[in-house]
Image (tube, grey):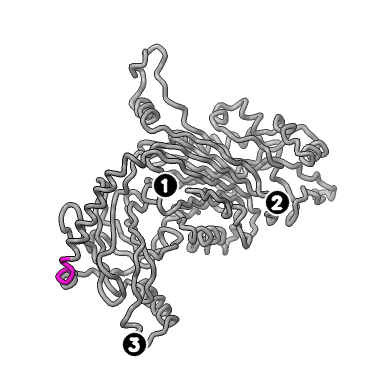
């Protein structure tokens, strides 16, 4: 069982002719149509100026050991940092997945997702995608300004626990195109215990080989321009005894332990691991701690026959690595004319030259203040420098005239570039500060309610019954079913409070209740 982060409840949307409204607002419509066309021209003029971009990426991995989330994740997300990330990627392992909780989490967002969504929404981030496989959870957040340029989103999973049929171990991934560059994020929880280092590598190779995507440009993980691999990878520190390991940690001489780190050892043997980079382990091992403390494992374990078992030796089980796709190069014997390269290699070579992508790790550390788990979270902060393959959204849209629940309203949208439209495309009305694609107030099917002005500007009608009575600061988003993403977002605009509701004596609390009643009726009718 798994869930993805894009889901929609089906609501009844009234289809309107809009004739009366068009007659009253015809002059205004033509003015806004011209304005929309003018803005389309402005996008094209600005395109050259905005091609180069630098983006900050914040990656978190944390084995939460079935614990409920803490009250505050400010430190985990570096919310007080002067530099705010453009993207957050959060990978959790061992999220509680008891039968009752897991069933509810498949219908509603789990507690961890809700915490991150509510925390980041006020800072103008939305959850773009998520995927869960039992205790494995992967969340991808973006600043709202980048959302129309995040496309071709897909998520998948691989089980590796108990003969490959159980999802307590495995990998979940999200792949996407960011300004045209293909990125993939892989969150893994691999086999435990000291003696299973080779099995961990086998599981990783199996995940890499079996995960595929419906994308011609990047059908497998290694085809992506940039891959991030993170999670509870469970590699341990070999040979050194408990006393030596803890002494090195206490003296902050972590480098004395690096050579016996199993992942470091296995990288020397396995080609697939050599393709991944990792920053220096200049932080203390993140496993295993007593709960609610910063003390390494001090408990006595009982074996089957009543003897005391060994305490767990500290280890860097929680890691963040990345792989920048190797640059395609001409064979030496071909004198640089491209002969001998297949079509795919030639395209990659052209992309590498025309649209360079560079990555720099700015920080790699653990966050020691959290003690709800026997693992400490690990955070990696990266800067991506890239040349954008496109700088204009696929669709430009805006509200026409004043909006309130007293009158039918209209959306104007204009395709800025060709895209695969569908009868399942829809335009959603969202309150500013919304948390995810599915957190809309209402939506309308584009093809059902559209009336074409001309080839450049199209009108879509929204019935007044679907507009919030209490009013709000809102945005409009165009969702492409084929691309599985938002491809256009309007500027924020004001939906006015219903004058009719106020005249009929509704106070603010009653107006809010009326909104909830209206939404409920739309859902069940």
Question: What residue does disc 1 label?
Answer: 154
Sequence-first disc among 2 and 3 = 2
Q: What percent of the width, then of the height, locates residue 421? A: 26, 51
Instruction: Bin the neighbour count of mark 1 within 10 Å (Cα to Cα): few under 14, some 14-19, many 20 and up.
Output: many
Which of label 1 and label 3 is nearer to you? 3
Q: CA distance from mark 2 to mark 3?
A: 58 Å
Instruction: Bin the neighbour count of mark 3 within 10 Å (Cα to Cα): few under 14, some 14-19, many 20 and up.
Output: few
Q: Is residue 324 above or below residue 81?
A: above
**Residue 162 in sight in this render:** no
Instruction: Bin the neighbour count of mark 2 within 10 Å (Cα to Cα): few under 14, some 14-19, many 20 and up.
Output: many
Question: What residue does disc 2 label?
Answer: 374
Are the residues tagged 2 and 3 within 8 Å (C-beta)?
A: no
Q: Is residue 506 left or right of residue 86?
A: left
Q: Is residue 289 left or right of residue 470?
A: right
Residue 23 lies in magenta, yes or no? yes
- Comparing 417 with 10, the one in front is 417
Identify the magenta region.
Answer: 22-27
Sequence-first disc among 1 and 3 = 1
* Dot 3: element: loop
Q: Residue furthest right?
A: 307
- Comparing 303 with 293, the one in front is 293
Residue 190 lies in magenta, yes or no? no
- Comparing 33 with 119, the one in front is 33
* Dot 2: element: loop
Q: Which mark is residue 504?
A: 3
Q: What percent of the width, then of the height, locates residue 324? A: 49, 33
Residue for point 29% across, 70% down: 403
Residue for point 40% across, 29% down: 352
Which SS type dominates the magenta stretch?
A: helix
Q: What percent of the width, then of the height, locates residue 129? A: 45, 52
Sequence-first disc among 1 and 2 = 1
């Amino acid at each position: 069982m798994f869930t993805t982060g894009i889901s929609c409840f089906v609501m009844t949307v009234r289809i309107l002719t809009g004739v009366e409204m068009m007659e009253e607002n015809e002059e205004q419509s033509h003015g806004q149509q011209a304005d929309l066309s003018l803005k389309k021209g402005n996008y094209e003029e600005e395109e050259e100026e905005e091609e180069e971009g630098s983006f900050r990426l914040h990656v978190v991995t944390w084995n939460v050991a079935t614990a409920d989330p803490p009250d505050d994740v400010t430190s985990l997300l570096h919310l007080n940092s002067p530099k705010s990330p453009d993207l957050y990627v959060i990978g959790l392992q061992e999220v509680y997945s008891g039968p009752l909780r897991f069933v509810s989490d498949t219908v509603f967002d789990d507690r961890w997702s809700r915490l991150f969504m509510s925390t980041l929404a006020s800072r103008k981030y939305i959850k773009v995608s998520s995927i869960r496989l039992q205790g494995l959870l992967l969340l991808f957040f973006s600043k709202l300004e980048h959302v129309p340029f995040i496309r071709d989103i897909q998520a998948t999973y691989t089980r590796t626990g108990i003969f490959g049929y159980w999802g307590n171990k495995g990998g979940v991934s999200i792949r996407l195109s960011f300004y045209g560059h293909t990125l993939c994020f892989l969150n893994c929880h691999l086999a435990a215990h000291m003696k299973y280092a080779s099995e961990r590598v086998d599981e990783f190779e199996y995940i890499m080989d079996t995960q595929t995507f419906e994308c011609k440009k990047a059908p497998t993980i290694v085809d992506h321009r940039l891959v991030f691999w993170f999670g509870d990878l469970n590699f341990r520190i070999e040979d050194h005894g408990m006393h030596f390991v803890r002494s090195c940690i206490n003296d902050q001489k972590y480098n004395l332990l690096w050579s016996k780190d199993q992942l470091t050892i296995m990288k020397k043997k396995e080609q697939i691991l050599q393709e991944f980079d990792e920053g220096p382990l200049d932080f203390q091992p993140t496993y295993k701690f007593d709960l609610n403390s910063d003390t390494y494992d001090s408990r006595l374990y009982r074996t089957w026959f009543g003897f005391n078992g060994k305490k767990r030796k500290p280890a860097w089980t929680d890691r963040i690595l990345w792989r920048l796709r190797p640059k395609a190069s001409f064979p030496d014997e071909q004198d640089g004319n491209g002969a001998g390269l297949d079509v795919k290699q030639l395209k990659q070579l052209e992309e590498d030259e025309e649209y360079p992508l560079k990555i720099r790790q700015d920080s790699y550390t653990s966050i020691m203040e959290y003690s709800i788990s026997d693992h400490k979270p690990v955070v990696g902060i990266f800067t991506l420098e890239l040349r954008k393959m496109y700088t204009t959204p696929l669709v430009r849209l805006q509200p026409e005239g004043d909006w309130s629940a007293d009158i039918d309203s209209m959306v104007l949208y204009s395709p800025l570039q060709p895209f695969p439209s569908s009868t399942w495309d829809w335009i959603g009305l969202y309150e500013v500060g919304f948390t995810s694609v599915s957190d809309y107030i209402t939506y309308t099917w584009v093809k059902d309610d559209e009336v074409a002005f001309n080839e450049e500007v199209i009108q879509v009608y929204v019935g007044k019954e679907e507009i919030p009575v209490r009013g709000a600061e809102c945005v409009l988003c165009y969702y492409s079913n084929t691309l599985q993403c938002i491809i256009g977002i309007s500027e924020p605009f004001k939906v006015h409070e219903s004058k009719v509701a106020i005249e009929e004596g509704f106070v603010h609390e009653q107006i809010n209740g009326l909104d909830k009643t209206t939404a409920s009726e739309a859902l069940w009718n």
